[in-house]
Image (cartoon, grey):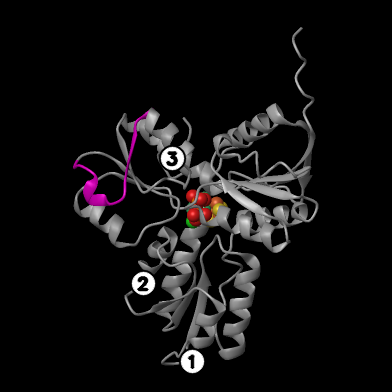
Amino acid sequence: MTQSPAPRPPMTLLIAAPRGFCAGVDRAIIIVERAIEKYGAPVYVRHEIVHNKFVVDSLKAKGAIFVEELDQVPDGVPVVFSAHGVPKAVPAKAEERGLDYLDATCPLVSKVHRQAERMVTAGRHILFIGHKGHPEVIGTFGQVPEGTMTLIETVEDAEALAPVDAENLAFLTQTTLSVDDTAAIVATLQRRFPSIIAPKGEDICYATSNRQTAVKAIAGRCDAVYVIGAPNSSNSLRLVEVAEREGTPARLIQRADEIDFAWLESVSTLGLTAGASAPEVLVREVVDRIAEHFAVTEEQVETAQETISFKLPRGLEAA
Ligand code: 2E7
Ligand code: F3S
């Protein structure tokens, strides 16, 4: 007699919304796709267009070639700059070489770039709150002359800073930071340097803050949280931190094959979210894989609705 399979234990999935792709990521991916349609393959892309292997591999399959530096792009082929932005020297070099280039920098990053230029023109020294080595940080530093911007990563950095002219400061931030950590750094700077100029509006973007609010809303009700995203995705890493700070164990996974079922053994409510560069198909893949092991009940928890979209660069609009 064949034995019937053991019943699957119950599992509630609380799925945060908003999650996943933001308007800047949608736009950046479309730019690569349209560039391939317009110019034909291959189209080069400087840096991962967004920090997600699945997205990068899908675009590779369509004819994109990913490189880290412009000098890896052969003469005569078009190149796309990633959503994270590039130092000014990069488009300048592309022009010098006569390369066709398309800039997929998120418009919200470009806005920070323009503010940096304006602040430096006004004679201010900029304190830039961000994570060392991240491409967005490298791109923003590359908008202004060397020595006019200082990186602040932590409250300790803000406390230790000894500026040449404390009366002449401004600050800006990376777009994907922790809202709470940044508020603490800004409070420190404003206490120490009361005349510091703040950015016009918030630099942390709507997508970053909405995803943090959403994961915060579910974390307290969950035994554990999975964030779908890549290890080099700043905004995804921040979502793990936010969940952990609510006292809930949280982990980053890229795809369903990284699910640790031993970790889920004592979990009856699991939170799920995805970073701004992680496509919804990967969320579905994770849900479906969990449903093979558990009797799943899904609940969407929505803390905001997003309607924002960005225009494409001229020449790439739909026909
Ligand atoms: C561009 C910018 O690609 P991501 O994972 O990038 P981060 O900056 O979070 O590592 O996510 C989309 C994105 C976010 N910010 C793209 Cl500046
Ligand atoms: Fe732009 Fe924010 Fe997305 S800066 S690329 S809208 S995460």
Cα distance in 3D space between marks 1 and 3:
42 Å
Label at residue 7: none
At which x and y percent is residue 7?
79, 25
Q: CA distance from mark 2 to mark 1?
A: 19 Å
- Label 2 Cα neighbours within 10 Å, binned few <14 / some 14-19 / many ≥20: many
Q: Which residue is mark 2?
A: 144
Q: Disc 1 marks which amino acid?
A: Ala
Give how far across and how far down residue 267 sits, in percent: 75, 44
Q: In the depicted view, which residue is nearer to us: 252 or 192?
A: 252
Which element carries disc 3, helix, strand or loop?
helix
> Quick one: label 3 or label 2, which is nearer the N terminus?
3
- Residue 310 appears in the picture as rendered: no
Which residue does the numbered mark 1 point to in the structure image? Answer: 166
Residue 296 forms part of the magenta stretch: no
Magenta range: 62-75
| Left or right, residue 197 beside residue 270 | left
Bin the neighbour count of mark 3 within 10 Å (Cα to Cα): few under 14, some 14-19, many 20 and up: many
Residue depicted at 39% across the width and 28% down the height: 62
Question: Looking at the image, is mark 1 or mark 3 nearer the viewer?
Answer: 1
| Front disc: 2 or 1 | 1
**Disc 2 residue type (three-letter):** Val
> Mark 3 highlights which residue?
31
Residue 200 appears in which quarter of the rendering? bottom right
Relative to the observer, which residue lies in front, 110 or 29? 29
